[in-house]
């Protein structure tokens, strides 16, 4: 794992808050690695949005559309792909808002994720996922 930088803006960031967000990110990656929409639904807000333009056109999905796509994939876990993700940074931009920048590799692609999280009723949830992917051969 890469070392992670934590930034704070007008907020005292505690180890507990950092740990809570890191746990969400780990659960997010586990859900992708296992292709498990039930696990992913625990970390995404029900109104979360998904965006990418990696193929040159904007793809925008809601969670009701995204989760079935994940479920239909053959999981990296089932093919015994290596388990690898890193968190480059977590930036707290307010008392209940954070942005996480993370990287992962799976399904023959490298991903850079920008995840916006909000804290509601004491729980951190991903509200937007914006990512870029490249094929391993393109990197």
Image (cartoon, rainbow, N blue to C red):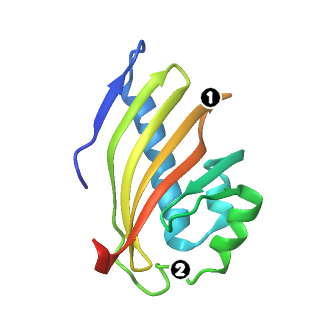
Which residue is at 50% across, 20% downward?
A: 94
> Which of the two discs, 1 and 2, labels the residue nearer the N terminus?
2
Dot 2: element: loop
Q: Residue at x 53, y 28 (%)?
A: 97
Residue 122 is marked as: 1
Q: Position of residue 71 (x, y in %)?
A: 66, 74
Quadrant of the rendered structure where residue 65 is? bottom right
User: In the image as oriented, which residue stretches furthest toward the left?
Assistant: 3
Q: Residue at x 42, y 65 (%)?
A: 133
Which mark is on residue 109?
A: none
Up the image or down, 36 lies above or below 29; here it is below
Vertically, is 5 above or below 128?
above
Tell whether 94 sits left or right of 138.
right
Left or right: where does residue 112 sit relative to residue 70?
left
Asked where in the image residue 36 lies, by quadrant, the reply is bottom right
Whole-percent x, y for residue 23 in the image: 47, 46
Residue 33 point in image, percent of width and height:
49, 70
- Circles 1 and 2: CB atoms closer than 8 Å: no
Task: From the viewer's perspective, tell me whether residue 42 is left or right of residue 137.
Answer: right
Residue for badge 2: 75
Image quadrant where residue 45 sits: top right
Estimate how packed mark 2 is, as few (under 14), some (14 to 19) or many (20 or more) residues with alpha carbons within 10 Å: some
Q: Nearer the viewer, residue 4 or 127?
A: 127
Q: Quadrant of the C terminus?
A: bottom left
Disc 1: CA contacts within 10 A as few (<14), some (14-19) or many (>=20): few
Count how many numbered circles sit on residues in the image: 2
Residue drawn at 54 percent across, 58 percent down: 52
Q: Nearer the viewer, mark 1 or mark 2?
A: 2
Q: CA distance from mark 1 to mark 2?
A: 31 Å
Residue 110 pos. (x, y %): 36, 68
Q: Nearer the viewer, residue 131 or 38?
A: 131
């Amino acid at each position: 794992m890469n070392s992670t930088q934590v930034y704070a803006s007008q907020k005292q960031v505690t180890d507990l808050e950092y740990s809570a967000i890191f746990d969400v990110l780990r659960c997010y990656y586990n859900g992708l690695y296992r292709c498990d929409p039930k696990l992913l639904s625990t970390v995404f807000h029900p109104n979360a949005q998904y965006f990418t333009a990696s193929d040159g056109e904007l793809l925008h999905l809601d969670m009701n559309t995204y989760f079935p796509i994940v479920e239909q994939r053959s999981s990296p876990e089932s093919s015994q792909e290596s388990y690898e993700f890193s968190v480059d940074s977590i930036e707290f931009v307010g008392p209940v808002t954070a942005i996480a920048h993370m990287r992962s590799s799976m399904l023959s692609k490298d991903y850079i994720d920008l995840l916006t999280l909000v804290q509601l009723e004491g729980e951190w949830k991903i509200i937007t996922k914006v990512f870029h992917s490249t094929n391993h051969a393109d990197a």
